[in-house]
Image: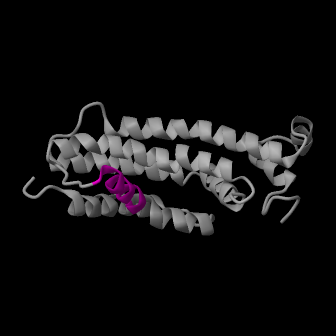
């Protein structure tokens, strides 16, 4: 642990913020205050991802399985690209490393970012369940299945090996196979 935060020096924080180390020290009297400000900013930016997911679902629900599949592929691409951004991955690593020291901030980030994304997916899947295109017992569970089918393989690798982000072809494979697996599990019979 360096300077009280595992894997994070003031030099690294200044670099990540795009400012000088002196600027960081002048603005923030201690690392706890800086960390709290960073997390507050990140949770505010989570709303942009939520908005992008909502927009990817479109204004009106798809009416056929093929349309739904295309729509879900669009949503999956938006979600995967947002979560695999180097800034999001770096911040997730930082938040995870400091969860025990700042449980309130970790919870807030989780509720606004990962859980918030799943909530948007849940709400956006509801019309498809109501229309009979999806057979879903629990929309929240189905939304979590969709999110982690899309994200898990690429996100895990990127968190541990940041120099090996998936190529465009790999991302497309993750998207298409995740959507297919989701529809195989949740499509209503005969639709």
The residue at 74%/43% (across/down) is: 36
Relative horizontal placement of residue 148, taking residue 11 as reference (left or right): left
Q: Bounds of the magenta span?
A: 138-149
Relative horizontal placement of residue 30, taking residue 123 as reference (left or right): right
Closer to the camera in the image, 92 or 98: 98
Q: Is 148 included in the stretch rendered in magenta? A: yes
Question: Is 174 drawn above or below residue 37 in the view shown?
Answer: below
Relative horizontal placement of residue 35, taking residue 79 as reference (left or right): right
> Does residue 166 appear in this view?
no
Of the 4 image quadrants, the one containing the N terminus is: bottom right
The residue at 34%/46% (across/down) is: 122
Give the dominant element type of the magenta stretch: helix, strand or loop: helix
Question: Is 10 drawn above or below residue 42 in the view shown?
Answer: below
The residue at 46%/64% (across/down) is: 152
Q: Quadrant of residue 181?
A: bottom left
Closer to the camera in the image, 135 or 184: 135
Q: Is 133 included in the stretch rendered in magenta? A: no
What percent of the width, then of the height, locates residue 103?
A: 68, 53
């Amino acid at each position: 642990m360096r300077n009280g935060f595992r894997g994070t020096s003031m030099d690294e924080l200044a670099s990540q913020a795009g400012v000088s180390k002196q600027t960081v020290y002048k603005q923030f009297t201690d690392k706890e205050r800086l960390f709290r400000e960073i997390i507050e900013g990140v949770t505010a930016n989570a709303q942009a991802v939520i908005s992008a997911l909502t927009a990817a679902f479109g204004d009106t629900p798809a009416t056929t399985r093929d349309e739904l599949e295309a729509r879900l592929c669009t949503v999956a691409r938006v979600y995967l690209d947002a979560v695999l951004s180097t800034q999001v991955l770096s911040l997730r690593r930082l938040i995870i490393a400091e969860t025990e020291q700042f449980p309130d901030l970790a919870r807030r980030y989780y509720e606004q970012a990962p859980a918030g994304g799943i909530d948007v997916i849940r709400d956006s899947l509801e019309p498809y369940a109501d229309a009979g295109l999806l057979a879903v017992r629990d929309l929240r569970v189905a939304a979590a299945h969709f999110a982690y089918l899309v994200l898990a393989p690429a996100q895990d690798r990127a968190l541990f090996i940041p120099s090996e982000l998936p190529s465009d072809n790999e991302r497309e494979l993750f998207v298409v196979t995740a959507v297919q697996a989701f529809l195989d599990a949740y499509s209503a019979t005969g639709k």
